[in-house]
Amino acid sequence: MQAKWFFIDSDAELQAAAARFLESWNTNAPFQIKSSGTTGQPQLQHFNKAQLSYSAQASIEALGLNEKTQALLCLPLSSVGGLMLLARSIVGNFEVQLQLPSARPLQNLRQKIDFVAMVPTQLQQSLQHDLHQLKGIAQILVGGGQMSSDLVAACQRAQLEVWHSYGMTETLSHVALRKVSPVEEPFFHALPGIHFSSENGCLVIHYPQLQEQTIVTKDLVALQSASAFTWLGRADNAINSGGFKIIPEILERQLEMHIAAPFFITSLPDDKWGQIVAIAIEGQQAPVFPDFQQLGLKTAEIPKKYALVSTFERTATQKIKRQEVLKSLANADWRSI
């Protein structure tokens, strides 16, 4: 099969990676895709062409892609997001412009594009520096991390058509989508052929076309129905402070507009409370902290200590590697707030 791929960057490694994908596709060879490593060591996942094809078709139907689609690939071809865009282009018979990943993928774009998949950092930079090009794109798919309320609001002000995706390497990219702009939907909705349940508050994915066994995640959710949920956070990040359960990601969303630096919530052992809330902050100096009580936080939720990290380690899709950062803070000077 002849793919409709065009290279914006004449990079030998990028072209070789695309050629390897196409050869595997045409010869029905197995695909090996490495997970991002956000929550631990990257794991190698194995899939076949039929699985990629089904996942691609589900995305095509959900997003309304067709043979007239002009797409931009600006994600690493080592990631499931990048590879699955190539699979969608073959299944949907549409054109893709390929370029090397960068923080500003639209900076030198001259071609007409009506669909792009980005990570939040790329979208944020494009809103700030390349808004004219961004507004010319009919549909924007965002994955690989959570979208801040500021980012969602900026998309809405620009009247962009933005979808936020939920998925992982194990599910061959997204299994659920939610519209965030121009109007934000509260729930992620399942793609065709997929349904959900929960176990101990964590999402369970039923995807029989991909694999017979259910996929039990560590994502805490509020299940609305068998096809819709609200994402809350990660079970392995949960904090128990004096018997009070705290989900760091929820607390981060409450604080993101009040702390002027990249940060994430973690915990430290404490003799009285068992665990206390702490903040890891990227930068050389601490930002001005808000009055946490005035923000309506419960006593257990109020951060008690902080530590500075010059630069957070991130994945290729710019997700913070929390566990790696915390390892680097094993002997850190945690200061009282």
Image: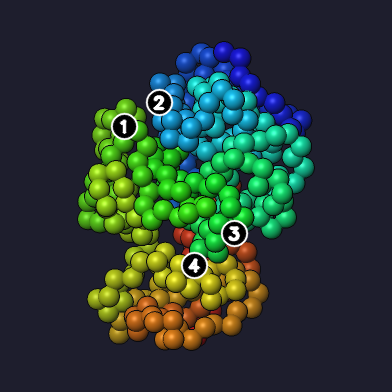
User: In the rendering, at what x and y percent does residue 262 appear?
Assistant: 57, 67
- Is disc 1 in contact with disc 2, using a CB cutoff of under 8 Å? yes
- Name the one closer to the observer, 185 or 276: 185
Residue plotted at (28% across, 39% down): 195
Relative to the observer, which residue lies in front, 122 or 95?
95
Residue indicated by mark 2: 54
Task: Looking at the image, tell me whether mark 4 or mark 3 is earlier in sequence order.
Answer: 3
Measure how far apart labels 4 and 3 are at the Cα level: 26 Å
Q: Are marks 4 and 1 in contact (CB under 8 Å)?
A: no
Q: Residue at x 40, y 21 (%)?
A: 50
Which of pointers 4 and 2 indicates the residue nearer the eye? 2
Answer yes or no: do the residues labelled 1 and 3 have beta carbons within 8 Å?
no
Q: CA distance from mark 4 to mark 2?
A: 36 Å
Q: In front of the other: label 4 or label 1?
A: 1
Q: Is residue 18 visible?
A: no
Q: Can residue 252 be seen? A: yes
Query: Is tag 1's residue or tag 2's residue first in the polypeptide sequence?
Result: 2
